[in-house]
Amino acid sequence: MTGVPILQLRSLTKTFGSLAAVDKIDLDFDEGEFFTIVGPSGSGKTTLLRMLTGMETPTSGEILLRGKRINDLPANKRPTCMVFQSLALFPHRSVGQNIEFSLKMKGVDPATRKARALELMSQLRLPESYYSKNVTKCSGGERQRVALARALAYEPDILFFDEPLSAIDYKLRKTLEKELKDIHRETGKTFIYITHSLEEAMVMSDRIGVMRGGKLIQVGSPQEIYSAPHTKFVSEFIGDVNIIGVTADGTAQVKAKEFGASLKTPAVPEGFGAGYLVVRPESLRFLSKADEAQNCLEGRLYNEYVLGSRVQYQVRVGDHVFIVEKLRQQAFGGHRDDKVLIGWDADDSILVTD
Ligand code: ATP
């Protein structure tokens, strides 16, 4: 990553009738970064991506590519390339024919085309012998690499991805996520990726932008999005999380609405009235006595789930169910309905308002 913006969005907006599908987005994409836009269905991701690739014209605002306005530049004139959702390759054609497609369209001679295809195949770790192999005989992972080689043959400045992994089964998807991250590093290209899965975004991205209702509500590194969400919505978007409804009690603490306890938090912002305290399940721990954590609650062990290398516990405090997560080696040896003490430190929680 260079920190130099390759693409800049200035108050970018797209309306359909009275609906702002994309609503005044300001964002700079850095050259060489892997940026993922995440958001639930209908949040405006596809509309945003379609404007960036030239398939949709903005209603207002600007798109600048290396400082030049490209709002009205048609898709085929933009030095970018889209990797489609389905990674659609030409079936019954060879790997080589698929990769060389754009070069053939440009009138590049066969020998130069083949040399370039083999170069891209080697970059993407596809064996040379695959040049004549039918793409339908390639595995899911290999097909992804062929699709990427085909996209790279266009020599794009930016590669766009529209949920390329959404239709792929879990195990292969996990492998492809890691592979895509490696390919990003090896090619040094700018990758702009959209997905509704923040989990997927976390694995691959340098930065993530979270969309909701056409707006970009938070941009940050995966670590920032996970550990310092600005809103309840962002905190809930990934994994399991404990969200406690709280009100200000006029001190440095807040009061839990559901079970009445006073809870220590990081600084309570001025003017804070009510909101939510967010605590990740791995930040909660079982205590043997009350002074082992800044916040301590008594509850009953309610359920236990083994999730591979981790164990998750549900603990009821009044009507509120907390989730506590431990590594399997550090599993808590309690039984259902046991009285337990759970706790966490103020700095392991975040106070959010929305
Ligand atoms: P998904 O994850 O389901 O693909 P998304 O985040 O990509 O959703 P968009 O497809 O960008 O969301 O849609 C954003 C909003 O704009 C939705 O409410 C959608 O119904 C609306 N919308 C998108 N395209 C059009 C269109 N051509 N005409 C009218 N409304 C549209």
Image (cartoon, helix red, strand yellow):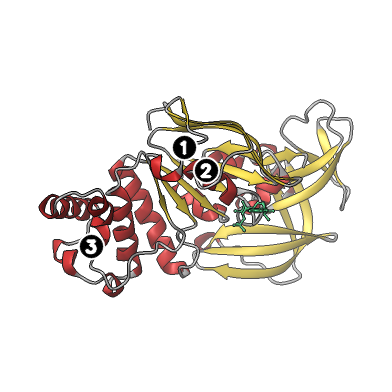
Of residue 309 and residue 333, the one placed in the foreground of this image is 309
Q: Amino acid at mark 3?
A: Gln
Circle 3 residues within 10 Å: few <14, some 14–19, many ≥20: many
Q: Is residue 339 left or right of residue 292?
A: right
Any part of residue 270 in sight: yes
Which quadrant: the N terminus? top left
Q: Is residue 21 left or right of residue 63?
A: right
Q: Amino acid at mark 2?
A: Pro
Of residue 64 and residue 316, the one placed in the foreground of this image is 64
Report which quarter residue 333 is drawn in: bottom right
Mark 2 sits on what residue?
A: 222
- The mark found on residue 97 in the picture is 3
Report which quarter residue 137 is drawn in: bottom left
User: How far across and down, in percent of the image, does residue 140 sit?
Assistant: 35, 68
Which quadrant: the C terminus? top right
User: How far across and down, in percent of the image, does residue 192 sit?
Assistant: 46, 44
Mark 1 sits on what residue?
A: 73
In the image, is residue 202 above or below residue 345?
below
Residue shown at 50%/62% (left/top)? 329
Q: Amino acid at mark 1?
A: Leu
Q: Marks 3 and 1: which is nearer the front?
A: 1
Mark closer to the chain start, 2 or 3 = 3
